[in-house]
Image (tube, grey):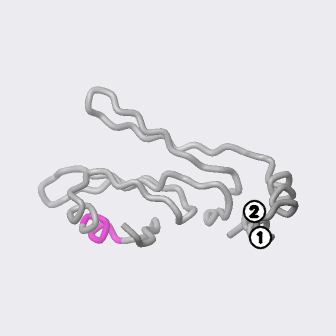
Amino acid sequence: MKREVFSDIPGVVLMKFMDEYRADLLLINYTHRTYHRMLENAGGKLRQAINVGSVGKPKDGDPRASYTILTIENGHLSVEQRRVAYDIKHTQQAILKSKIPDLYANPLIKA
């Protein structure tokens, strides 16, 4: 799927995406806002939409890296979203010294 799926997207729209792909689980990235949404269709079936995390360009005000751990046990999916601090200044300096365009250094703190 080639579209941004932000945390405030209506549940009915997410359900349409999931119907289109016949999916009960939708893993999302790129939006720089970690989230986990439980959705229930008209038949009572639960579906989940999970933005798995990002490093840099935080759009929720938290500059730490975020990631998601998915665990499946006995057919049950558990979702744990975590944050971890990293040396942002060091990373910015490394970007500025590299061939990566400088414009990628500042958004590590704030989008």
Query: Which residue is most to the front?
Result: 99
Is 28 positioned to the left or the right of 101 in the image?
Answer: left
| Quarter-of-image position of residue 3 | bottom left
Q: Which residues fall within the magenta stretch? A: 10-15
For label 1, the crowd category at 10 Å Cα-Cα, with few meaning under 14, some 14 to 19 and many 20 or more, is few
For label 2, the crowd category at 10 Å Cα-Cα, with few meaning under 14, some 14 to 19 and many 20 or more, is some
> In the image, which disc is placed on residue 82?
none
Measuring 85% from the left and 63% from the top, which residue is drawn there? 96
The type of residue carrying mark 2 is Ile
Q: Secondary structure at mark 2?
A: loop
- Please state, as top left, top right, bottom left or bottom right, where the C terminus lies in the image: bottom right
**Taking 101 as reference, is 48 above or below it?**
above
Is 15 positioned to the left or the right of 87 in the image?
Answer: left
* Camera-nearest residue between 42 and 33: 33
> In the image, which disc is placed on residue 109?
2
Which residue is disc 1 drawn over? 101
**Taking 91 as reference, is 82 above or below it?**
above
Measuring 77% from the left and 70% from the top, which residue is drawn there? 101
Q: How many marks?
A: 2
Query: Which residue is most to the top?
Result: 74
Q: Secondary structure at mark 1?
A: loop
Measuring 25% from the left and 54% from the top, which residue is drawn there? 23
The type of residue carrying mark 1 is Pro
Is 64 positioned to the left or the right of 5 in the image?
Answer: right
Q: Provide residue 14's location: percent of width, then percent of height.
A: 31, 66
Q: Provide residue 59's location: percent of width, then percent of height.
A: 62, 66
**Taking 67 as reference, is 105 above or below it?**
below
Q: Provide residue 13's location: percent of width, then percent of height.
A: 30, 71
- Please state, as top left, top right, bottom left or bottom right, where the N terminus lies in the image: bottom left
Q: Of callouts 2 and 1, which one flags the residue occurring earlier in the amino acid sequence?
A: 1
